Amino acid sequence: MRHRRSVSLSFVVAGVLFAGCSHAAVRPSGSAPAQIASGPLAAALQTDLQSILDRARADSAFPGAFAVVGTHAGVLAEYGVGQLDWAPSPRPDEHTMWDLASLSKVIGLTTAMMQLVEQHRVDLDAPLQRYIPTWTGKNKEKVTVRHLLTHTAGLPAFKAYDQITHDPDSMAVLMFNTPLDTLPGVRMVYSDIGAYMLGRLVEQITGQSLDLYEHDYIFQPLQMRETMYRPPIALWNRIAPTEVDSVQRHRKVRGMVHDERAYYLGGVSAHAGLFSSGHDLARFAEMYLNGGILDGARIFSPDMIKLFTAHQVADRALGWQKPNGTNSAGHKMSAAAFGHTGFTGTSIWIDPERDFYVILLSNRVDPTRNNNKIGRVRVTLADSLVSTYDRLVHTTATK
């Protein structure tokens, strides 16, 4: 029943998009944004985006934000609000680049892991020590790849190693040698250190640095040309700044990763470090909704999508988060949905049952991380957009 519903919804959405218009269409993936979608569904979603984001900006939830929603076929609506900074600066658009923070874990790391599992180069239930024998310590021989992907490895959430060293090699040694807090499998603790270790696994298996592997096998095939670690200075005027770091870097952070551990690791880590745009993340979401393929580029199989987005423990899939009624998915996403958030104010949710995605990019940490209003914005946006989508699709389907 679910499969038939998804197929029928695709046809219904197409009908809603084109109702009453003879020339507008969903923007093909990767093309110029001259025309997005038209029709009652697109117009209603656009109204939702503008209303919610305008209110959030007026409430100082962030200096600027960009949101995009769509289906497997392309973008339905997108909207940029505010400015890149509280100081006079440009309005965000689809090519504005944002510090993704922990979205790095799913856009980069989890995609790489899906590829390696599909190629039988990594076994989810093998101990990490099979691949990295030098990762030793009490009970570490019991930690599997699956434990790390579900944040049940027994590792702490993070350690303030940036207050101990600023040397990249010393930082890497500290991250690598972090002892377990508990036995693996006992509880779920969202861990940057666990994600870091999975990045080391990718490098060990592939013989490439994490950033080069992700560029070669994910971003370049998907034509995600605005997705990268360590963006060059020439791009910094397109990047939304994050926090004023008055303690260590003594500047407003822009063009360099906000996360302190990732920064002192040299800007590249599996847990944080990626920058990207609304344009590129829309392509990424469309790839998922097209069964792992976009514009002829096959990133992974539909079977890998099912495996990695299935519920595992608590509100976790493999790498991804699942809706639980209290997180950023809101209250209306299907059980098949999966997503993630980033500390800087970013989030992505993909609902394959509806053939629908919602991406929100902001720099809510500018000028300080103490601004926590983004949580309400994420939930309100998700609930409103899904309600509008369901109302118009259902209305059209029953006529």
Image: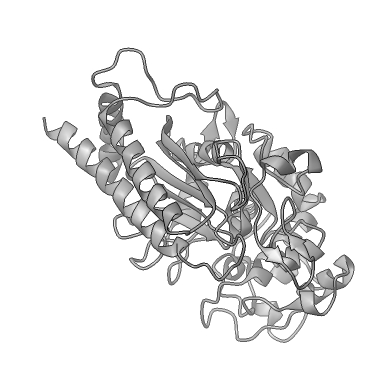
Quadrant holding the C terminus: top left
* Rendered location of residue 205, percent (x, y): 76, 55
Residue 1 visible, this angle:
no
* Apparent side of residue 4 relative to residue 196 in the rendered image (left or right): left
Q: How many marks?
A: 0
55 or 308: nearer the eye? 55
**Residue 198 location, quadrant:** bottom right
Is 89 rendered above or below residue 140? above
Which color scheme is applied? one colour
Residue 370 visible, this angle:
yes
Quadrant holding the N terminus: top left
**Residue 295 location, quadrant:** top right
* Rendered location of residue 117, percent (x, y): 62, 52
Taking the view exactly as shown, the residue that stands out farthest to the left is 399
The residue under the point 86% across, 66% down is 168
* Apparent side of residue 58 relative to residue 130 in the rendered image (left or right): left
* Rendered location of residue 110, percent (x, y): 60, 54
Is 147 rendered above or below residue 102? below
The residue under the point 82% across, 71% down is 171
* Rendered location of residue 131, percent (x, y): 75, 64
Taking the view exactly as shown, the residue that stands out farthest to the front is 88
The residue under the point 58% across, 66% down is 146
* Apparent side of residue 54 relative to residue 11 in the rendered image (left or right): right
Taking the view exactly as shown, the residue that stands out farthest to the top is 22
